[in-house]
Image (spheres, helix red, strand yellow):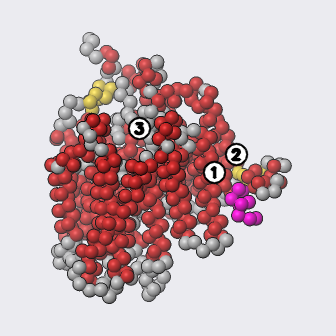
Amino acid sequence: MNAIEFILAGMLAAATPFLLAALGELVVERAGVLNLGVEGLMALGAALAFIVVYHGGGHFLGFVAAGLGSAVLALIFAAITLGFRANQVATGLAIGILGQGLSALFGKTYESLTVKGLPKLSIPGLSDIPIVGGLFVQDIVVWLSIAATVTIWAMFAYSKIGLVVRAVGENPKAAHAIGYHVIAVRFAAVAFGGAMAGFAGAYAAIVYTPLWADGMIAGRGWIAIALVVFGTWLTGRIFLGACLFGAVSLMSLAAQATGLNVPSQLLASLPYLVTIIVLGIISADRRLLKLNGVASLGEPFER
Amino acid sequence: MSALSATFLPTLVRRERASLAATLAAPFIALSVTTVLNLGLYVLMGRNPVDVFYAMLLEPFLSWASFSEVLLKAGPLLLIAQGLAIGFRAKVFNIGAEGQFILGAIFASAIPIWFPEATGQWIWPLMLILGVLGGALWASLTAFWRVRLNANEILVSLMLSLVAAQLLNYLLLGPWKDPNGFNFPQSVMFQYDAMVPILISGTRVNVSLLITIALSLAAWVFMQKSFAGYKLQVGGLAPRAAGYAGFKESRAIWLSLLIGGCAAGLAGAAEVAGPLGQLQRSISTGYGYSAIIVAYLGGLHPIGIVVSALFMAALYIGGDNAMVSANLPIAAVRVFQGSLLLAYLVAIAFVRYRFEWRRAAYRGQP
């Protein structure tokens, strides 16, 4: 297997934690809320999922526990920012610290333990194609994540729910005036974002690298937030961005395996450096951000 | 849906003036609530809450030996938080102080690592200055990205912190590793003159505490008395008004980030030239993130921050105590910190708003 085949085969799985968390944050931000606690939500989900699977609960229950747990933590964020109108940046940071703390606390006795991942399902025919065949051999969660991407894209493009979420994010006063309950929509969006971050953490801990280590999320929640900006709040571009980051994180593995004479720390920083550079390139185009950005992002709604 | 909100959701009405007493009481009320909730969590974990309470929140203040350790820990937290608070008031969210702190430590360590034989009382002051430069340099990357490339400073500064942690690892496992250090990821021990002189004999508290107190005073003068500080605050509270008054946003961003970076860099330098005495991995234990909580808990006010930094330092020392005496995982400190900031944000909402359990439209009717 050469490097390109290796990256193509592993890219989607590596991208899945980024993708799930970023899709969740996309819905949150489209509703006009900025939740910076994704890293902590993912960490909590990862710990809960790992504990459930380790004790024989199975992967499905693991994902359910992660989704529920992180959604509850996200609802605390919603109650404080939407109910008490607290600063979203500070609250998000606090939720992040709390989530990482709870994750470390719950995971304490599971350090370095492992669980079994999930089997890969291949699409007959397509998976036999040379070079790109590896793309079509993935576990069930990857396939479901791609389905979720399409669903969310369609929701924003065609459905009334998508339209209501966007209206609440663009102009909450107008949405309120025509009878939508802005706060309720935002609560729902934040809970959804929390559950997705929980799934993302669960995937990282019980499927992608099924081994518990404190701090295993390693900045992926923050990159997911950056991905929403990279994708300029568009579902398709966020998917591409997640694939890019999946490939970048594999590139460092591939380079280490081939014995390339580059310090491993430089390779480990590669995703962060790419984030900084791409963020600079995309943000420099102010017109692009204005065109697709969410008008009321981060602002509390006052009737 | 709106019938539901009429009965169950209160309307928030902004108070004309926030009362000073309520503002001062808010962090203490938040602390009480957080303590009760966290002790409840420890009970669920099967720990004796009285033991934990004693070890975590009382013991740090009960003996001079442990209180001097609190003072030692409070130094970097106080310094970083003072720098960050200035930026937060201008609504410039530098959350990458951890990275700026690490770079300060790395820059300061260059002298004793490259010139281990050098002697003279010029060494430690020069190290502190280099630390300031290192922190400022790392922060200036974020400022450049924000001002020139319009990139979000929260994300960029955080990513740079993660890069800084890797840079530290690289140095300690590679070029700066102590050749006689049994392969531990740490540098050589620094020479005597590379250490900040001890201030209170018998403890590890050194002269950098005086510098920190002096800089806290300077922060107070800057924010409450100077025109430059006033311009920053206006930029944070009313960006449009600041624009009309000709206060440049780009200047505010550069100033906020550079102040934050200098303070964090100095704190990093003071750590390696103080309690650590060498560059090691444990330099990065999350001071940069805790300082964010310290800054908010202190109401972003230079005097409030002094109190909150002391408390947060005590929590660190107390967390270590509780780990030993009550077998409490050290992660409990992070949980406490996060929930404390959340409780504070709720408490401060009660200071800012009145909660009315009537629908706004009905007001004034019988």
Using the rendered image, report if marks 3 and 1 lie on a common chain.
yes
Residue under the point 26% across and 30% down: B14
- Please give the name of the residue rendered at 63% of the width and 60% of the height, measured from the top-left corner: A250
What is the count of numbered marks?
3
Label 2 SS: helix
Among the two numbered marks 1 and 2 on one chain, the one whose residue lies closer to the N terminus? 2
Q: Which mark is residue A298?
A: 3
Pointer 2 with pointer 3, Cβ within 8 A: no
Q: Is residue A267 left or right of residue B339?
A: right
The amino acid type, in three-letter code, at marker 1 is Cys
Q: Quadrant of residue A177?
A: top left
* Sequence-first tag of 2 and 3: 2
For the residues labelled 3 and 1, say whether their Cβ atoms are less than 8 Å apart. no
Closer to viewer: mark 2 or mark 3: 3
Tell me the distance, in whole angstroms, between the alpha carbons under discs 2 and 3.
Answer: 32 Å
Q: Which mark is residue A143?
A: 2
